[in-house]
Image (cartoon, rainbow, N blue to C red):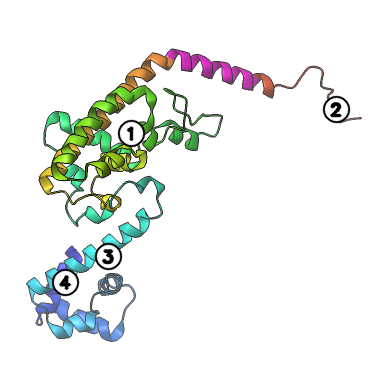
């Protein structure tokens, strides 16, 4: 951005030495000059070439709006392409992000000390960096079970933690009713809302990012409603995380004992048996 702003200043000051160097570069095209680097940026952002800029004479305001719009479009398209390849971005809505502004999950959350902790927990789960058993199983290939340590029924992924785990159902039920009441205030389709709330996948989507296009079957909510939904959902994620941590602390001695036993069994099975004949290399 600074380099493009400087380029605009060079193109406007026709009597400067830098402007003369730019004209010389368009004729000679030196590979190691600053203008060669600028030409690469202009081509990447789909902006006019250096020779066109020198001949047109953009005003400062017009050039600034031109390169800012091109930069925003380039990075927006690149982020969308990259997010499409990341499974961890499944629940994230990149279309709600604007250049230079935070995501609505951050910008529309209440600004209190307690809410900051809740937002941080929600962002970890939304980005896929919250360490669940499925993440441990993916990174550790030595017999790590991906099933939930609390209910032991399903692999512990984000949907299981938010919408399915039976060990934290009492936390989920209270917030689900509160979320349903908030949604009913802004949408008349009660049956559709009840269906959405009971669907584990859609419920997880609402909790993590209620601006996602998959929820367009519901009525578009105003900004105040989204702020209220985000506050309720982030309270839910933080409460689920706290309850999960508390229950895991209680199970920690038992889990540690099982892990040590498993490691001991693995060491024993790896040792060669005393009855196994050893071949003589000198025979």
User: Mark 3 vs mark 1: which is more N-terminal?
Assistant: 3
**Is there a contact, CB below 8 Å, between mark 4 and mark 3?**
no
- Would you place residue 226 above or below residue 25 in this image? above
Q: What residue is shown with label 1?
A: 162
Total numbered labels: 4
Q: Does residue 112 show up magenta in the picture?
A: no
Q: For this rendering, which residue is in front, 94 or 49? A: 94
Res 126 seen here: no
In this image, 20 relative to 255: left or right? left
The answer for how far apart the CA atoms under marks 2 and 4 are is 78 Å
Where is residue 279? Give x, y as percent: 85, 27
Looking at marks 2 and 1 on the same chain, the residue that comes earlier in the sequence is marked by: 1
Q: Which residues are magenta?
A: 253-267
Sequence order check, earlier mark of 1 and 4 = 4
Which element is circle 1 on?
helix
- Give how far apart the Cα atoms at labels 2 and 1 are: 57 Å
Judging from the image, what secondary structure is the residue with disc 3 in?
helix
Local crowd size for mark 4, using a 10 Å CA cut-off: few (<14), some (14–19), many (≥20): some
Q: Residue at x 60, y 17 (%)?
A: 264
Query: Which dot marks residue 279?
Result: 2
Is 263 magenta? The answer is: yes
Specify which label sits upstream in the sequence, 4 or 3.
4
Comparing labels 2 and 1, the label whose residue is closer to the camera: 1
């Amino acid at each position: 951005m600074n380099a493009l702003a400087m380029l605009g200043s060079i193109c406007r000051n026709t009597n400067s030495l830098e402007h003369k160097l730019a004209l010389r570069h368009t004729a000679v095209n030196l590979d190691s000059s600053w203008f060669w680097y600028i030409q690469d940026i202009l081509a990447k952002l789909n902006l006019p070439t250096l020779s066109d800029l020198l001949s047109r004479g953009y005003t400062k305001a017009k050039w600034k709006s031109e390169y800012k719009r091109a930069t925003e479009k380039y990075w927006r398209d690149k982020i969308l392409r990259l997010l499409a390849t990341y499974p961890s971005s499944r629940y994230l809505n990149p279309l709600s992000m604007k250049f230079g502004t935070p995501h609505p999950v951050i910008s529309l959350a209440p600004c209190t000390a307690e809410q900051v902790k809740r937002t941080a927990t929600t962002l970890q789960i939304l980005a896929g960096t919250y360490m669940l058993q499925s993440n441990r199983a993916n990174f550790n290939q030595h017999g790590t079970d991906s099933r939930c340590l609390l209910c032991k029924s399903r692999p512990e992924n984000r949907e299981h933690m938010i919408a399915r785990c039976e060990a934290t159902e009492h936390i989920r039920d209270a917030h689900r009713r509160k979320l349903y009441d908030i949604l009913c205030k802004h949408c008349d389709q009660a049956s559709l809302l009840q269906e959405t709330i009971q669907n584990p996948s859609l419920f997880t989507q609402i909790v993590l990012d209620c601006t996602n296009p998959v929820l367009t079957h519901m009525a578009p909510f105003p900004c105040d409603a989204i702020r209220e939904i985000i506050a309720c959902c982030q309270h839910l994620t933080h409460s689920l995380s706290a309850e999960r941590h508390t229950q895991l602390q209680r199970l920690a001695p038992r889990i540690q004992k099982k892990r040590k036993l498993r490691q001991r069994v693995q060491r024993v099975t790896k040792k060669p048996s005393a009855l196994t004949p050893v071949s003589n290399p000198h025979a």
